[in-house]
Amino acid sequence: MIKRLFGVLALTVLAAPLAAFADTQISAVGSTALLPLVKEAATEYSTQHQDVKISVSGGGSYVGIAQARSGTAELGDSDVIAPGNSGLMDHKVAVVSFAIIVNPSTGVTGLSAAQVRGIFSGRVTNWKDVGGANQGVVLINRPRTSGTRAVFNATMMGVSKINEAGLTVDSSGTVVTTVATTPGSVSYVALAYTRNKPVTVLMINGVAPTEGNVITGKYPIWSYEHIFTKGKPSSEIDAFIRYISSNRSLLEKLGYIPVSRMKVKETNR
């Protein structure tokens, strides 16, 4: 009887499934300018490391910073630094160039910095006043939670305030679609979103937003792309962040610039 009992117990133990190891769950939230890079990197990384599950969403840089600080998300993606947010660790993963884009109907291909300030402050209301078509200016802005807006404001507007009377669009992809379909419209967006899109990318003071002009500081509207973590990240999270910043082929494929290529430094970015 005892022998039979031990036999049943042995079979039960052998039949029991081995305990599965828990997957690593990582959530990344924030900048839509950084979204394409983090999203594609997450797909690649999860394919190579099937025990790591990564969810990626936008919402804006300041949302990303807030969620990283609260611990709601492991990664807070941002176009801007997070001053005053003690406890956050900053990981610079790339550099992004931002473009001013217009609907082709405007008839302009370039503006001076002063003309940009005039348009976005509301002082210039017709494209003919800056050498374009006789057509009203339609401003398309980003919400105040947007890091793209913060970078544009810091690098282009000076003491001029952005006119809030225009449309407000909450994601980079929607900005490009709206400008492409709205005659007379103008906005600002990460250059990576403009590829093969029916919008005109403007030169500023005669300088185009090329990689060469960004890394030498000739083109003004650019930013480091940051990923913030609440303190020092775990080894799994750190490995994913390093995968993003060191994946040169993916960076260049999507239109981002490796941090190591920059020849100018900006402490406020």
Image: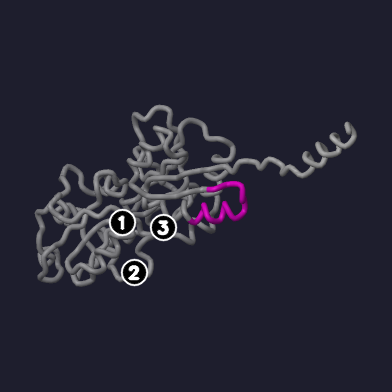
What is the distance, in whole Å, between disc 2 and disc 3 at their CAs?
Answer: 19 Å
Residue 45 inside the magenta-drawn segment: yes
Label number found at residue 212: none
For this orientation, the residue located farthest to the front is 1
Quarter placement of the N terminus: top right
- Residue at the spot of label 2: 197
Name the residue: 59% across, 37% down: 235
- Residue at the spot of label 3: 211
Report whether residue 54 is seen.
yes
Q: Secondary structure at mark 2?
A: loop
Q: Nearer the viewer, mark 1 or mark 3?
A: 1
- Residue at the spot of label 1: 189
Q: What segment is highlighted magenta in the picture?
A: 40-53
Q: Nearer the viewer, residue 128 or 231?
A: 231
Name the residue: 18% across, 56% down: 167
Residue flagged by tag 3: what amino acid is it?
Glu
Q: Secondary structure at mark 1?
A: strand
Label pair 1/2, CB-CB below 8 angstroms: no
Residue flagged by tag 2: what amino acid is it?
Lys
Where is residue 239, by image quadrant? top right
What is the distance, in whole Å, between disc 1 and disc 2 at their CAs?
Answer: 12 Å
Q: Position of residue 43 (x, y in %)?
A: 53, 55
